[in-house]
Image: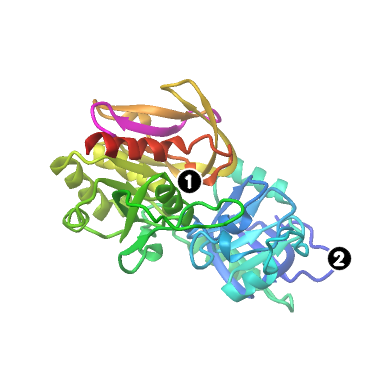
Amino acid sequence: MHAAAPEKRPTACLTLADGTVFYGYGFGATGETVAELCFNTAMTGYQEIMTDPSYAGQVVTFTFPHIGNTGVTPEDDETADPVAAGMVVKWDPTDPSNWRAEDHLVDWLARRGRIGIGGIDTRRLTRAIRQQGAPHVALAHDPEGNFDIEALVAKAREFSGLEGLDLAKDVTCAQSYQWDEMRWAWPEGYTKRDTPGRKVVALDFGAKRNILRCLASAGCDVTVLPATATAEEVLAHNPEGVFLSNGPGDPAATGEYAVPMIKEVLETTDLPVFGICLGHQMLALALGATTIKMNHGHHGANHPVKDLDTGKVEITSMNHGFTVDSQTLPKGVKETHVSLFDGSNCGISMEERPVFSVQYHPEASPGPQDSFYLFERFVEAMNARA
């Protein structure tokens, strides 16, 4: 089935593995990319989404139509370059209208080698993702409008998908580094920590910069280590706490090397441990639970999550295609948070130790400050241990 082609010659197309083709107008880089397709319901933050390492291997459909209207600024990058494979929008990006804008989204994507397609019925596409699961797609942009549809369909069908795929090694840092930048605040912007804090080792499985800023703002001296760091390398820094970051891909695949490290830290120390997103999933694996691939995942800045300890509901930002199977949590590990959309697991903790994690992103501030207490809880656990 082919969506009706527009009257003007299309310059981009999105081809699904089932043979469905969406025609539109390309922007940003030219060429082709193959990935999993997801949708994100956030009304703001498209630059943060495109530079979130958790989106490696994915093309993002934005359900909000006004993409590009605030331009882009280096301050909002979550990592050095866009990581998402491409973007799908309803309307072509507009000229920026924001005092912080330093560049146009279209130009920024072109320089960074990322393809965009506009003029797409994103509501129809989102319904298809919800009903059929996240499809494998080929996204192509050619200013001349020349497309080999059969070849693009074949490439989408050949894509192996994210199950079994370790992508953390592709987005992690190459070597360790210190982090002292704190959260953005008016009117100074980003400032540096200038007082001693609790020594934290953060494992970078695809860490967003704002997570590191939140740790610094909460009172941490942060040392970031690559995803493949061993327990011996982690403990050589004499940390007072260990942080497990977000990241892309299948947690079971990344867990091949990360889970043994986490287990050894848990078995040989009493250090507080805090995980977010992929870090949450791998902590669960290290504690004996399992993870499963979701139909279409959770991607957006409007997800209600209930804290089972307090009964409070937090409005959270999410980006994950895998989830912890709460039915497999072992004795001594409790479920602390659940999604009010579908009841899926959103948080765990050990009952007798300061070891906890959440599936969502407390640094993303959709609430806007509903979940910052988690960083404070981590620091309080380190203070109590000192």
- When asked about the image quadrant of residue 179, the answer is bottom left
- When asked about the image quadrant of residue 172, the answer is bottom left
Q: Is residue 183 magenta?
A: no
The residue wearing badge 2 is 7
Q: Quadrant of the N terminus?
A: bottom right
Q: Which of 71 and 188 is in front in this view?
A: 188
The residue wearing badge 1 is 320
For image coordinates 63% across by 55% down, the residue present is: 46
Q: What stretch is highlighted in magenta?
A: 340-354
Decide if residue 196 is on the left or right side of residue 144. Answer: left
For image coordinates 59% across by 42% down, the residue present is: 301
Q: Does the magenta stretch include residue 346?
A: yes
Label 1 crowd (10 A; few <14 / some 14-19 / many >=20): many
For image coordinates 36% across by 54% down, the residue present is: 164
Is 280 above or below relative to 103?
A: above
For image coordinates 52% across by 57% down, the residue present is: 190
The amino acid pointed to by label 1 is His
Q: Nearer the viewer, residue 270 or 58?
A: 270
Q: Which of 147 and 56 is in front in this view?
A: 56
Q: Is residue 284 visible?
A: yes
